[in-house]
Amino acid sequence: VQLQASGGGLVQAGGSLRLSCAASGSRFSINYMAWYRQAPGKQRELVARITRAGGSYYVDSVKGRFTISRDNAMNTAYLQMNSLKPEDTAVYYCWAQTLAAQNYWGQGTQVTVSS
């Protein structure tokens, strides 16, 4: 399975970005899709996760600002990030798990929020 992430960039505090993650090549249906992030000197953390049925989870620090969604037909997940803060600066990674419990990571995309 290949995960192609896109949409990162440089934005001022208070701005918005939308990340996309397109999955391809899976023999099994994609169950969970998620976004993780890793800031310099910090561990990778789960930001948001969405099930195939649309159930979602957010880390407390992004609740009310970020929205995860997905298009099952396109095997694509999105992360709409609003009211961005400098502390959201990180490399964002897409992750997917198939119904066969296989885990895959996409390449990271840099998000930089300037103050």
Image: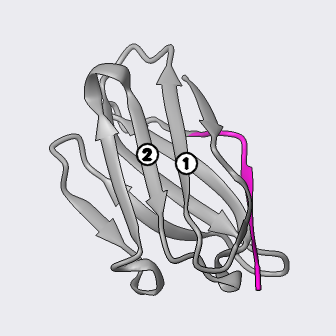
Residue 19's disc is: 1
Q: Is residue 37 above or below residue 8?
A: below
Contact between labelled residues 1 and 2, with CB atoms less than 8 Å apart: yes
The rendered magenta stretch, by its main secondary structure, is classed as strand
Spot occupied by residue 106 in the image (x, y as percentages of width and height): 64, 39
| Crowding at mark 1 (Cα within 10 Å: few <14, some 14-19, many 20+) | many
Q: Which residues are magenta?
A: 105-115
**Left or right of 66 in this view: 108:** right
Residue located at (62% from left, 38% from top): 5
Q: What is the quadrant of residue 58 in the picture?
A: bottom left
Q: Nearer the viewer, residue 14 or 74?
A: 14
Q: Nearer the viewer, residue 72 or 103?
A: 72
**Left or right of 96 in this view: 68:** left
Q: CA distance from mark 2 to mark 1?
A: 5 Å
Q: Residue furthest left?
A: 53
Disc 2 marks a residue whose amino acid type is Tyr
Residue 110 is a magenta residue: yes
Residue located at (40% from left, 86% from top): 60
Disc 1 marks a residue whose amino acid type is Leu
Q: Which corner quadrant holds the N terminus?
A: top right
Residue 91's disc is: none
- Residue ID for mark 2: 78
Q: What is the quadrant of residue 15 in the picture?
A: bottom right
